[in-house]
Amino acid sequence: MTDTTTRSGTGQQSARRRPPRAPGPDDLSPAIRLQDGVVKYGFVAVTVLLFIYFALSEPAFGTPASIFAMLKFASVTAILGLGMTFSMVVGGMDMSIGSQAGLAVQMAAMTMVFYNLTGGTAVVVVLVVGLLVGLVNAFLIVFCKIPDLLATLAMMFVIQGVKLIPVDGQSVSAGMVLRDGTPAPGKFTPEFLLIDRGTIGPIPIPVVIMLVLVVLTWFFLARTKWGRLMYAVGANPEAARLSGVPVGFYRGLAYVLCSMFAAVGGLILVSRIGQGDVNAGASSLLEAVAVALVGTSVLGMGKPNAWGTLLGALLVGIVLTGLTMKGFQYYYQDTAKGLVLLVALLFSYTMSRKRVRYTPAT
Amino acid sequence: MPNRLQGVAREGSPVTPQAHPVPDHGRYALELRGIEKSFGANQVLKGVTLALDAGKVTALLGANGAGKSTLIKILAGVYQRSAGDILVDGLPAEITSPLTAAHNGVQTVHQRIDESIVPGLTVAENLLFEEIVQGGLPPIGSLRRLLPRARAVAETLDLEWSDTKLRTDVFELGIADAQLLVLARALVKRPRVLVLDEPTSTLSQAEAERLFGVVTRLRDEGVAVLYVSHHLSEIQSLADHLVVLRDGLIKDRQESPLDMNRAVRSMLGEDVVVEVEQTDRRHGGVVAVELRGVQLLKRSTPVDLELRYGEVTGVVGLLGAGKSELARGIVGADPLRAGTLRLDGEPFHPRSVGDGVRRGIYLVPENRAAEAMLPGWSLAHTVSLPFLGRVSPFGIINRRAERTRAKAVIAEFGVVSTGPDQAVDALSGGNQQKVVVGRWMSSGAKVILMDEPFRGVDIGARHDLSQKARDAAGKGACVVVLSSDVEEIREVADRILVMVEGRIVLDRHATEVDSEAIMTSMSEVAPR
């Protein structure tokens, strides 16, 4: 800046000399630096403090068994939140994620109970169905140009409704009576139930899956070309297009990945509940949205990201486990989740001086 | 001179009774005295003094950023002036809101028609919208009861709209009818002063002529019209007076006959005409891009053009001349309306910018903030975005290579920054532009099109960027710079093209033309 003003040094220019751009951290007032610090580390601090509080006040809370239970509980939310993270990275939001998890629950149950097939087959079926639903979402958003929120909202209702038809609105469980009056031939196989109940060393399998997916998502979004281009599409689609980025492809890819994560989350869920509950996944949408949004405010990232989403899921897990141990009834849970989200949004939108780069497009 | 107004009768229009009496001689319908307006430290209007005669059309001309829209918004009551006086019929008037503007007899038809109509309501409701909002008419009730009043409003413009048309959703109206609707609504109030901001930008030829008929009639009825337009042919045929706004001041006032050449020069700034050193101007070699029968604008004739390697082609034209359409069509950002492209002699049909980029055709878009910047992105990320594959073996970004590229751009273009990790938003305009130009130029550009690359850029950065453009052409690239500023183009170009309304009206080597000739051809009025 300085050399250009001297070069064009007319009186008018120097009168309008701009203040130095990009002030370093030392130029900021202590109050602003405190505010930045609160925004950046506040959420991590809240999570740690809550954990310490619950651990001190409820001796059972801090035990390894309790911690693993909590992590297991958080795993489905975290995985769906990671899926949601992809759709939010491209500037959208997948409203159908909960119903897709519910669809996965039912597809797995039907494969094993109705058709007496193996757990491995069920996994394949669920992943293929997840892929197909993701492609439909991508088609509606990219080719039919329906705004993300609306297309996936419609798909949410379609999936919720359609999945009830082959089961006559009933939950799928071993030994249930089929339409023709015969009992269902199959049951949940032991291997399949191991998805939720098994451990690797001391660590429950869902927790392992969650951690692997967090690392993969982080690596994909932060370290690969494809992830970077997804962020570009979300940050300014027109600038991305004029840089030669195939914007439609990356938006579509984000929704396909989102659906695959929903399918994986659904698999863990159905392995946990051991039946094809028609209501499974119903509350997952709001949890996934909440933890992904919490994630955008973590560590001052200001954009949807994998580790933030994980931390969001852990915080929700800590709060819900802690409240349950303190004897609060289940109906306090939604209030708690809502407050967690609200606090996160206050950090991101109200207190942050940095502009948050996620505002859902419609 | 043939023009769009031919055949429009000036006499014989029915003169409807005036709500406001015609003012005494010597008093203006509207007078602005020393109007100033600042936004923060940025003074946009620096004392505009301007008078509008009743019964005259006054054209307002000005380049981008001259302060036109600010002036219009002050007249419309959208903005408040920082200093100065507004007089209506010789009496001081306070225009503090759109409503008080209307009370003072000043009506404005804004450029964006879609912001003035309410989709979902019928044509009749839109015609009567202000009366409904202000409580003059019941907000609910039978549409049938509104129809007679709506018909009366439509008739102020001699619009013979049937009841069926009045009952349809305003969304179904064509853009021209919507324009007439907004105009009719403005005329209901019997304005003393009517401000029209770029009223023909979306109209077809026939629709535009219809509008001119209306404007002529209003003038003959004693309305003072302020007509804001970039279309010199319209101004030439329609306006009685002309004023030119530049840098927040009125730089030229004319009464008919209008000298468009002089107007364009005052609009672009004749006082900065400097003879550019023309020692190292080159002649291009092989044809890089060839356009055949390419139609750039809705109402323009097809263009044939060859762009060559080894020279800087400067394309100069006023806003809306079709420069951006040319650049965006070549790179594949927007489809061409008609015509074909050849690249290196072979047919080239880009369907996306990616097609252009893969063939080495790069575009630096006109609007940096909206089309090139990614909010919050670092310099390194912004630089690597178009060529991420080159630093990402197996899809994994090599961050060291990425930063090296950014450092190269910083060094080569002299970007003043704290380094590759600084957010580009935090840089000054000139340095931002160096980043978005440098990321393309440092990546083996074969053809590079730069649309208004010097906008919002300080003189130092502008000099650096044009030197880089000249260097690139010297190394054999086909460089195209598009701008509305004659001096910018003369500073950078080997060959100069002048565009007017989608056509190329002048194509010369830079040593063969001076600013005078360029401005003269820019002010050429298209034969119709």
Image (cartoon, coloured by chain):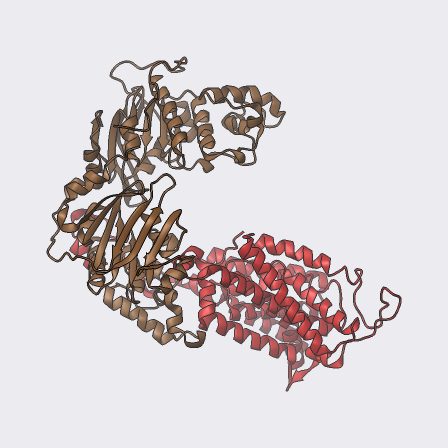
Chain colours: A red, B brown
Q: Quadrant of residue B441?
A: bottom left
Q: Is residue A5 above or below residue B234?
A: below
Q: Quadrant of residue B331?
A: bottom left
Q: Residue B402: x and y, percent?
A: 35, 72
State which quarter of the image contains the N terminus of chain A: bottom left
Q: How many marks?
A: 0
Q: Residue B499: x and y, percent?
A: 27, 44
Q: Residue B512: x and y, percent?
A: 13, 48
Q: Residue furthest bottom?
A: A201
Q: Residue furthest right?
A: A181
Residue nearest the viewer, comparing A220 with B92 = A220
Q: Is residue B473 left or right of residue A202?
A: left
Q: Is residue A31 visible?
A: no
Q: Is residue A194 above or below residue B75?
A: below
Q: Residue at x 28, y 46 (%)?
A: B41
Q: Residue A118: x and y, percent?
A: 74, 78
